[in-house]
Image (cartoon, helix red, strand yellow):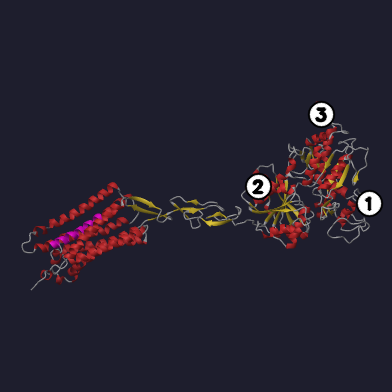
Amino acid sequence: MIGVLLGIHVDKIYQKLTFNVRPPRTSCTMYSLEFYQQLQTLIHTIEEINRDPNILSNVTLGFQMYDTCNIPHYELQGALQFLNEVTTLSSNSRCNTRPSFAAVIGSRVSANSIILANVLGAFRYPQISPYSSVSLLSNQKMFPSFFRIVPNDKLQSMGLAKLVLSFGWTWIGLVAADNDYGLLGIQPIKQEIIKAGACVAFTEYIRLGQPNRNAPQIVKVIKESAAKVVIVFSFEADFVPIVNEMLKQNITGRILIGNVGWSRSPLLSVKKYFQILSGTLGLAGVEHVVPGLSQFLSQIHPSESMGGNWVNLYWEKVFNCNFFYWKNISGSLETPLRECTGEELLDGVMNSSTYISSLKYSYYTYTSVTVLAKALEDLKSCKEGKGPFSYGTCADIWNFKPWQLTHYIRRVKLTLSSGDYFYYDQNGDLPSVYRIVNWQLSPEGTVKQVQIGNYSPTAIPEKALTINSSLLLWPMGGQQVPRSVCSESCPPGFRKAARTGQPVCCFDCVQCLQGEISNQTDSITCIRCPWDQWPNPEKSRCLPKSMEFLSYDDALGGTLTTTSIISSLIPAIILRLFILYRQTPIVRATNYSLSCLLLISLCLCFLCSLVFIGYPHHQKCLLRQVLFGLAFTLCVSSVLAKTIMVVFAFMATRPGSNLRKWTSPQVSYMIIIICFLLQFILCITWLSTASPFLQYNTNTKPELIIVECNEGSPIAFWTMLGYLFLLATISFIVAFLVRKLPDRFNEAQFITFSMLAFLSVWLSYIPASLSAQGQYTVAMEIFAILASSWALVICMFLPKCFIIVIRPDKNRRHLIMKNKH
């Protein structure tokens, strides 16, 4: 005898309990066409086994059936009745007065199965559940006699997590029944989601103790959340109130992810729910056709089939009619108005999609009975002396102990009618493959679950989940994968900055700092570019930095180069003019030899600026400041010699003066040599101790490499420049003091103006050079070189050239010398 616990009704009437009187008997509601068909499948399978001479010959299987309505205390009550061998609603005829109770098939609900397993396991009575999948039941120490036909929920939970993560969703809502099935099923999903870096937007529980299942609160959370994807882990009967509330509040655009408990639910596969469930994804068990079941079901009739009122309810459900001669207790939402006659033909409805869908779990019931029959056959076929028990003994098929049958069930191995090989592992679990289904609307207007892929937990990780995206349809028929994120992805060039007090999936996109890049979407950190590279404008990759120096090709560099070359020609032209007119009074009066030396040095001053232009090679860095300093020292010392010679010349003309010997040209040359030699020694010392060198400057302008010359010793540079200042200042002071000497053409006046301009230029250069950056620092020095050189050319030689070229009539000795009379 087999005990069968099956919920023909799947819900109950919720009554308010006062706890001061005995609670009333629970009334069952929501008759399930699907589970009545499970009962018929069980009857059909038992009859097939009883007719088969190759299995359990001379043994007849019978059953006792109890409608539990999925209520825990009804489940327990039914199991205790089986143990006490009390006849319940339906049983077959008995061959003896004390039948052998073999095992229990049930319960459908995992939480109820745990209760039963604790009771039955205490006596080692086998329990086979076609539907209970909670992972806790795999604990063979706690539940040593529990077996099931469906895979462990942990595998299903891992599959659901991998499914949502495969679409890139990172903001996911969770809804679960508040029983062991829901709580233990949702926990691995949450762990996998967090482990993968995604986040749980909310976790809500379907309160099974409330008539409305807490639907208003759950739907409110779903509506207010930004999560577009919601995993629902429950049975269909518990999820129906949630869908009704979503329909009431018109919550659309959400992608619901269903577990095996409702992913192919006939109860939800109706058109009125499709606007809510459109595009739903879910895991479903493998479906197979039970041999001969369709023919058996076609013979059901209210007047002939076993089950009493259950058969009448079945007939009413199938044909949408009502037997008025008995009280309708189906609890259906819509009462049919047409009277059932009993003459309706099942052949007309058995091919409908709704009817076929209701048979999806029949294979599990068939497998449960088949496994139990195979275990009994193995027990019956045992050869004495070769048995599995002590001393090779066997169990007696007519008087076996519960633990003996448990032993044989654990070791069952058989090939089912579908061709699948069935066996249990060490935890009482079996290999599994899940189908991935997508809820779509067929052309005929019916809701169907289209298989779009598979999930095989035992396959290698890369091939465990396979999805045919071309078959997918999202809510309202779209094919673009919807997004479900708390924050939009940060593009390259940005990094994620976590929001205080919120999950890691909620973040702000912060642009990378200067000199940093992020070359991936959703980068957590930015990467600093190497010293010689700089980010592109998008800050997504590093590019080689541009090198900045005063190039001949630049407009500024080209202008300065042209100006320097042209400017250097002016002193050369003046020198040529002076050579041609060297015998004229004005040339002789300005000390011809010093003037020629000054013009040559000015030409060198103009040309030395070219050393500052172009790529600053090491040789350029060594020579450019030295050449500049020496050229200008020669120039300024020549001016100083001219100034001093003017003073000596006028002082020597006084009566009784002994300074005539100091007016010789050798004195002026000596002044120039001494001044030049001091600067030369300073430059040699500079080059020997802290010479200038090529430098790549990335601090001034981080986006560029400024190729420049490091002066080595700033003290030496400013000492060299200060020495020029000293010479120019002495020349200025001396020239200023003798500017009013009695001479028609007193050159001291022009030296005064030239030195004043020279000093003004270089005094302005100091703050300007300190504020300039990059190539403009070099350009500023070149400008100072050109400006100060031009100041000397203009102040010293322009008046002389004017007289020589334009007014030669004034180039006479008597006009040059001042005449008192």
Q: What residue is rendered at 37% in x and 57% in y?
A: 774
Q: Tag 1, which secondary structure?
A: loop
Neighbour class for label 2 at 10 Å: few (<14), some, many (≥20)?
A: some
Q: Which residue is mark 2?
A: 192
Quadrant in the rendering for residue 266? bottom right
x then y, percent, for residue 190 = 67, 49
The residues colored magenta run 629-647
x then y, percent, for residue 762 = 28, 61
x then y, percent, for residue 210 = 77, 55
Q: Tag 3, which secondary structure?
A: loop
| Label 3 to label 1: alpha-carbon separation | 47 Å
Neighbour class for label 1 at 10 Å: few (<14), some, many (≥20)?
A: few
Q: Which residue is mark 3?
A: 387
**Which amino acid, by three-letter code, is at mark 3?**
Gly
**Which amino acid, by three-letter code, is at mark 1?**
Ser
| Label 1 to label 2: alpha-carbon separation | 53 Å
Q: Which residue is mark 1?
A: 303
Does 555 lie within the magenta span?
A: no
User: Tag 2 or tag 1, which sits nearer the N-term?
Assistant: 2
Q: Is residue 540 left or right of residue 424?
A: left
Question: Disc 1 vs disc 2: which is toward the camera?
Answer: 2
| Label 3 to label 2: alpha-carbon separation | 45 Å
Residue placed most toward the observer, 640 or 436: 640
